[in-house]
Image (cartoon, rainbow, N blue to C red):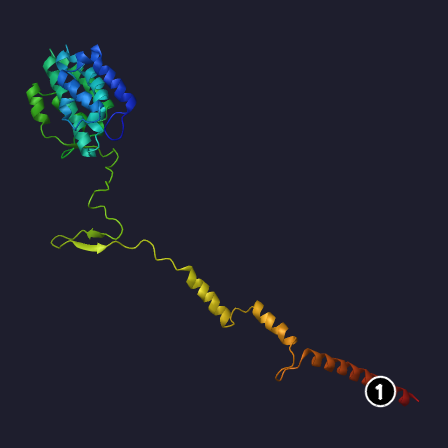
Amino acid sequence: MNKALNGTLTASDAAQLKALLSSDAGRDAFSPEQRQDLQRFVEGTAPTRDARELHSDLRLLKGANEVAGRFAADLVLAHGALLEHASLLRGDKATRLFEFAVPYAQTLLQLAQSDAELRKAAQALLAEANKAGFAELQQEPGNKTGLEALAMLLKAGSPEEAARLAQGLRFDAPVWPKDAVRQTDKHAAGDGQLQTVQPKPGEPAVMRPLPQVMMEPVPIQKKADSEKSRRDDGTSKRLGPMMLWNVLHGLRDDGEGERDSAAQREALTQLAVAAGLILVFLAVVVGVLVAM
């Protein structure tokens, strides 16, 4: 079944589990207390429970050869409450997964009638545990995997000894995704906050501001002012529309001050043309006289 990320069942899975609890199979497989807890889980109000309390009624098993199959089936049903609660960290999940298998190891030791039956049932249980990812669990401290630690419990002389060997064991799963950083974590510094510099041994911790990621953008107005100053001081190397207008206006001046008017300049031009024609005519006359 698909589980929601917040540790509760989806609507479809909740309906299926509710139907199972109301069926004859559900009444036979779970005690009244377990059914009540599962009902709360369906409603989304179940707290985190001890992993060793999430199994079905193992007293209904008749032989050691039934333990492995019941372990696999119960793990599917208990997966959400066991591993998907929002408050669980990766190490908590790994430890809870191993703790879930302890009652099954104790039941197997109790039901086995011979060494041969014990070895065969133990191999079947370890095979199911391997499918469930026990080989990915890493004991802390220690170098045993979860699969090796479970095999150690199955070699115990009694269920009580198996419980003693499992007491206090802690696990992690390095290959599983890392724990997500929560927004409420104090060490997750935001903008403008201080970060702690890890000190050397014997030195106090030092707080310093986080570095600025981006520089303050330059306002667009500053660029416009720069362009304006270039136009004003004549360094733009371009003839602006106002300068062109001034030149045209100067050509059409009325002659005030020391400037010539347009009419005066036109008269001077005509006079210069006439003078040039006279000079050309005189040159022609002089050339004819010389030729005679």
**Residue occupying the point 68% across, 78% down:** 262
Query: Which amino acid type is marked by label 1?
Result: Leu
Label 1: few (<14), some or many (≥20) within 10 Å? Answer: few
Q: Write down the quadrant of residue 138 in the picture.
A: top left
Quadrant of the rendered image containing residue 20: top left
Q: Between residue 115 and residue 208, name the one nearer to us.
A: 208
Q: Quadrant of the C terminus?
A: bottom right
Q: Quadrant of residue 242?
A: bottom right
Q: Residue at x 22, y 53 (%)?
A: 194
> Quarter holding the N terminus?
top left
> Is 99 displayed left or right of 276 in the figure?
left
Residue 273 visible from this viewpoint = yes
Q: Give the camera-side residue of 227 and 119.
A: 227
Q: How many marks?
A: 1
Question: Where is 138 relative to 292, above or below?
Answer: above
Q: Which SS class for mark 1?
A: helix
Residue denoted by label 1: 282
> Residue 226: percent from the left, percent from the top?
45, 66
> Residue 220 or 172: which is nearer the viewer?
220
Image x and y of residue 163, in percent: 8, 23
- 212 vs 166: above or below: below
- Going by the image, does 99 lie left or right of 244? left
Residue 92: where, in percent of width, then height? 17, 32
Q: Residue furthest right?
A: 292
Residue name at image x 28 percent, y 23 percent: 11
Residue 18 is situated, as x and y percent measured from the top left of the image, at 23, 18
Viewer can see residue 116: no
